[in-house]
Image (cartoon, grey):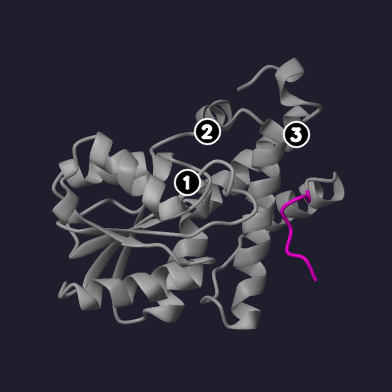
Amino acid sequence: MPDREQRRGISDAQWNDAKLIWNYHQMRHVPRPCSAAIGLGSHDLGVATAAVDLYRAGLFPMIVFSGGNSPTTAARFPRGEAVHYREHALDLGVPADAILVEPAAGNTGQNVTFSREVLREAGVAVDSLLLISKPYMERRAYATCRKVWPDVDVVCASEPLELDDYVKAIGDEKLVVDMLVGDLQRVIEYPKLGYSIEQEVPGDVHAAYARLLHAGFDSRLLTP
């Protein structure tokens, strides 16, 4: 755990709440061979790194890196999330003919929907899908994919990191906790909007979420 001085005013109790939500977000699927993979674009290049490791393990023959730009990624990935992910994978030795790029998606539903079309156009038959995301986005990615591509068998994966290690990689404890809270809000609210399927949220996770919201971890909430 980052020491108290490094946690920017985050108390031990709040850190424990964040860990509870972090663990909830992860689906804990056992990776297995799938027809194809989708690497969901974001600010986190670790998604591409995880994809490379899973490709090397022989878990899929083809991956679509999906994502355009957003206000939070434009400076980091000026050519678009998917393009930078592809370049990173190529640098790490993944062959170019194993990578497809979907450069237009602006949200998770579009990531899946547009990537499905890219795979179809490439002649890749898909009955199982390895969905690779940030560690705290696994559950929302799963719920979204089950909504927009209900007939595919979905396996979720991410970098095998614990919260402490992820925070060190990002370098901003407050921001990471805000993102955990924001993604949980989306898990709760998106089914009502038709964006994803319902996910059961245990009572202790709901309580941790309420406490962190009350404490001001709210910079990544949905805007009205």
Q: Position of residue 121 (x, y in %)?
A: 22, 77
Residue for badge 2: 166
Of labels 3 and 2, earlier in sequence is 3
Q: Position of residue 187 (x, y in %)?
A: 60, 65
Residue at 13% across / 48% down in the picture?
A: 58
Secondary structure of the residue carrying numbered label 2: helix
Magenta: main secondary structure equals loop
Tell me the quadrant of the picture where the C terminus can be found.
Answer: bottom right
Residue at 48% across / 60% down in the picture?
A: 68
Q: Find out whether residue 40 is within the magenta segment.
A: no
Looking at the picture, which amino acid does disc 3 mark?
Answer: Ala
Distance, label 1 to label 3, CA atoms, is 22 Å
Q: How many marks?
A: 3
Secondary structure of the residue carrying numbered label 1: helix
Looking at the picture, which amino acid does disc 2 mark?
Answer: Tyr
Of labels 2 and 1, earlier in sequence is 1
Distance, label 2 to label 1, CA atoms, is 9 Å
Secondary structure of the residue carrying numbered label 3: helix
Task: Say which of 141 and 123 sits in front.
Answer: 123
Q: Position of residue 114 (x, y in %)?
A: 39, 74
Q: Is residue 27 visible?
A: no
- In the image, the segment drawn in magenta is 218-224
